[in-house]
Amino acid sequence: MAGTRTRSMEEDDEDYWMSSSMKNKASIFDDNDDAEGIMLLGVSRNKVKDLSKTMKEGLGEMGNTEEDIINWDGSSTSSGSSLTSDLKSVRYRSSPTSHLAPRKVTSNSASRSSSNSSLSGQSRVSNVGVTVPKPSPDSLTSSISDAVQGAKRVPSLTDVSKIEAEVQFLRRQLNLARRDRWEKLPVRETVKRIILGEPYSLEAYKSKEDKLSLLDTATAMHDGNAIMAAVLFLKSTVKAQIFHHEMMRRPVATNHYLIYLKSSREYNQLADILGLFGRSEEAAMLKYKQAVSPVEQQVKIRNLKQCLGAHFSMDPSLAYNTSMVLQQLSLLETQLPINEYDAQLEREGKTAIFKEFPRTRPLLGVPVLATLYYCCFYHYGLPENNLACPAALRKKYNLTSKQYLWVALSARSSIRHWRDIDELFASKSWFGHHKMKSPVSFDRVVDVLFRTGAPPEVIDKYLRLVDGIEQRLTIARKLKCHVVVIDALVELRDRQELLNYASKLQEGTNDAMHAQVALRNPATRWKN
Amino acid sequence: MSAPIENCIPLPDLQIFRQLSRDQLVLCLESIPGRKDLVLEPGLMRLLDRIAGASLLKQHGVDKIFKFEGKPIRHGNDQRLYLVRPDIETVKQIAEHIAADKTAGKERVYRIILVPRKTFLCENLLEQEGVHGYVTLDQYCPNFLPLDSDLLSLEMPGFFRSFFLDGDQTYVHTVADALINLQSVFGTIPNVYAIGNCSKMVYDMMETLREDRGAPAALKNEIGHLVLIDRDVDYITPLCSQLTYEGLLDEIFGINSGYCDFGPEVMGKDQTIRLLLTCQDEVFDDIRNRHFSGVFNFLSTKAKELASDYEKRKNLATVGEMKDFVANKLKALKAQHKSLALHIGASEHIINVKAKTDFEEHLRTEHSLLDTSQIKENIAYIEEAINRQYPLMQSLRLLCLMSQVLNGLPKNDYEGLTTQFLQSHGFEHMLTFLNLKKLGLLTEQEPSKTVDSMIKTGKMTAAGAKVATTVASAIPRTTSNYSQVCRKLNLIPKIEEVDLKNATDMSYVFSGAFTPITCRLVEKILAKEGFDGLDDVMKLLPGPKFCNIKAKSVKDYRFIIATTAIITGTRLLEGVMES
């Protein structure tokens, strides 16, 4: 299959997947089970389904040999032995080449002998590490026990070099330990200790210059942990004014300070700092996030009002955000009374629509379009002065004609009020002539109707409004709207294809009769 | 990373890292001798699954394993190990556990092992909470986890957000450390290339760490080149829909540390299975990289072959043959059968899910966006996807993709589309859009004069202006940035060049619509062994560029991919949303 990318929208659906789907074009119809002719990348769903079924049945016959695998979360899962037990199938190195010989590996967990040394148990990354035992190729159990033995093994003569390295390391540590605490180490040395997870002390850095040099060195060495330590040390040892002044010139350090504030939930200070550093959108949105976090709708409304006044309306650069927050506020305020009223109607049980279609959830905290859908479903045709009137909602939230159409169409189709749908598209021309018009193309309208389970006659009606006979034909075939297919073939004067199509229709059905009538019509001038 | 092929020597055996991680885990477990309980953060379970097994934990004194859920665990052993990420919230809850035990008069030994790193903030917090005296703190830094024979992952899904969104540099060290460990096993990598901020930092950190560890053991280099690339160099690739079998599996089911969970929708009965996806599964290995359009044919051929293999048992003449069949062939056949059934079931589910969501229209839009053609029609489709409330991830991916290829949306389109999105999916997504803007994933085209005018009107202090300028120049994207990169790296192949069934061009993963930028960059860099001739492309990519070439090498390469985490478009964007 050569390239399958289209460069033009005019090419229709089927051509998109070119040759592979061309093959399937014929087969959609052959396969009677294929109710929707659904395909993905040229692969027919039903073919896969059939094969899948066969395979599963076959598997059942054979009986399952299953064993449990490790299961952390307690849910019972099982799996076939040969598929999942990776631990058994791990490919260790098969020959004892140089890689397999016990090899020095740097290890975090440090050697047994040093981890409890005087360095207050800090584990340290060192050259002295665990000897990797030669992995045994057969199974998990033996390799783990190897690992365990390896971890407990007494160092042999071959490890002498390792021990020497360790001695050197300890010697160096001892020297450092002798002079570290009370003596001012070069800042780079201290930062390195932080990076390596060694013990360190910052209290010897008394001058502002030293503190800043510590911070700048940490930043230059790119270690977030050291930056964090330096920032908080600075903050706790100089006055706020100096701290802010210095932070303002150090965006990386500022980020780390913000992370600290966020993780310790000091939101007010976080917002203050963001505001101070000119990041007003972030500050406002932080406040917004807090405002909308309560579940209770009344509280949310109160919070939002307060937040809007304090952080949004004053700032012209946040005009867009402000308009969105205003919409949200108005939506929350609109939902409350509608929800309350409808809940009461539902409780009373006198209103037909609530009896027939009970509400699945309250109309609270849902998006604008979901609210519109709800109102199109339960309150279609209310006068505009009613809160729940769909047209009023449309105006209030400045919705586009497409937004309104998609929602109204799918809601009215779901509730099976076809006349409302006709009215959605009805427009009168100057001469009083009725014409169907839509802001979206009719093939998409058909798609919505089909997905909401509209009956064939409704689909047929809108299918006939699809522009372009080829497109109409393609969709009609896909949706198995036989009458539309037949009429389109007549319009194309393609007698051969019509004969072919008619031969596959079940005899005696209206569709088959329609095809026969069309084929016998002497007025048609067939092209073949 | 790339390892030169020398007479087709196999890739270095990456499984050794699992062994190393396992040994280190054992040391952590043995740091409290005797029986103890393990409290494990859910996010680390799959990782631990791959490194060790329950039996290993038991061997080292772990009695019960609890899932860390924040609630205090009252019962259990007198010794307790917590294995968690260094998250302040988590550590705070642990401190509360300890305090609750104290109040109840329960004496216990606690040890918190932070993965991958002990942090200043966590230690500080334990001090503040007044429990520092009762608990010891340690760290466990797993090595790269070999997810497959050529794929290494640090399994740090939070890395992208923390570094690129929050500017948190805490884990630069972790990445560098893992790469140093890799080199202590396979020898120092002579040639290093770094593209982007984070990559350069990792390189610098490796140098810092090396100072301390001294000269590495004189090993033969098994890996010749290391190419470090930041994620923000190429957002487009994860935003596109991958069309290989494995890619679709990941999008639909989610692959977690190499495990994929299949439920009843695949099994056809009320049962779930956890499948480990590696090249050990022959059927999977055959189809993982195939374009989805070719997967089904392959599977059905395979099924027919299998059926005929089964038939052979009917022709077995002697008892000896029968014995041989049962002893040797039957098990393999059953395994294959089971594997086939699973993968066919999974393909079926993929088709079902994708059919519900207008996938082909989505793809068509995606591909024409990559072409930067028919922007008006594409906007119309994105509007439709938003208005019809398709799964929000779908619309969001298209929005981000459009912003990437156009270097930001024009102000009107930006406001129009985001407003409709908020009206469809909730105003809370304003927070998502803010994060996307900060990351440069979805932006509004801004007239470049903004910074200047702010200085003139005196609204910003001098220092503030400086910051703003550096931020602005850190994103050197000009209006035709994407098309230039495309042209210079030849990212969009001609239609006739791509054969999806027998793929020779890497763009096949996107049906030939696009070549992943990172892959092409690596190809070009290795061809020149440096950035020669790539200067004009490098100018267009964000962040600093750096290369250090010490040795020339052979020209045939095999590749090992090492990453902080495996990403898909969905995971990328989910990671960016506010909870």
Image (cartoon, coloured by chain):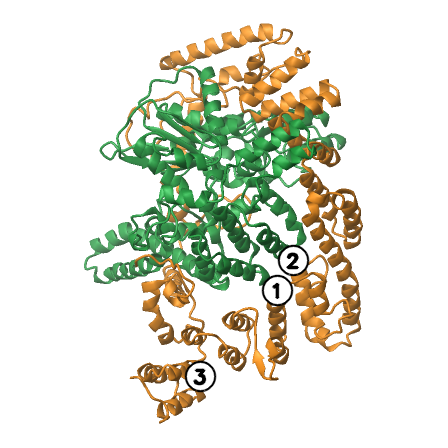
The quarter of the picture where residue A401 lies is bottom right
Residue B320 image offset from top left, x and y in percent: 21, 53
Q: Amino acid at mark 2?
A: Gln
| Residue that numbered label 3 is attached to | A483
Q: Chain of mark 3?
A: A
Q: Dividing the image into 4 quarters, which one contains the N terminus of chain A? A: bottom left
Q: Position of residue B185 (x, y in %)?
A: 38, 25
For the residue pair A197 and B326, the one nearer the viewer reads as A197
**Label 1 SS:** helix
- Label 2 to label 3: alpha-carbon separation: 39 Å
Identify the mark at residue B423; answer none if there is no mark.
2
| Subunit of label 1 | A
Q: Position of residue A125 (x, y in %)?
A: 49, 20
What element does badge 3 sit on? helix
| Extreme residue toward the front, this view | B456
Name the one closer to the observer, A74 or A327.
A327
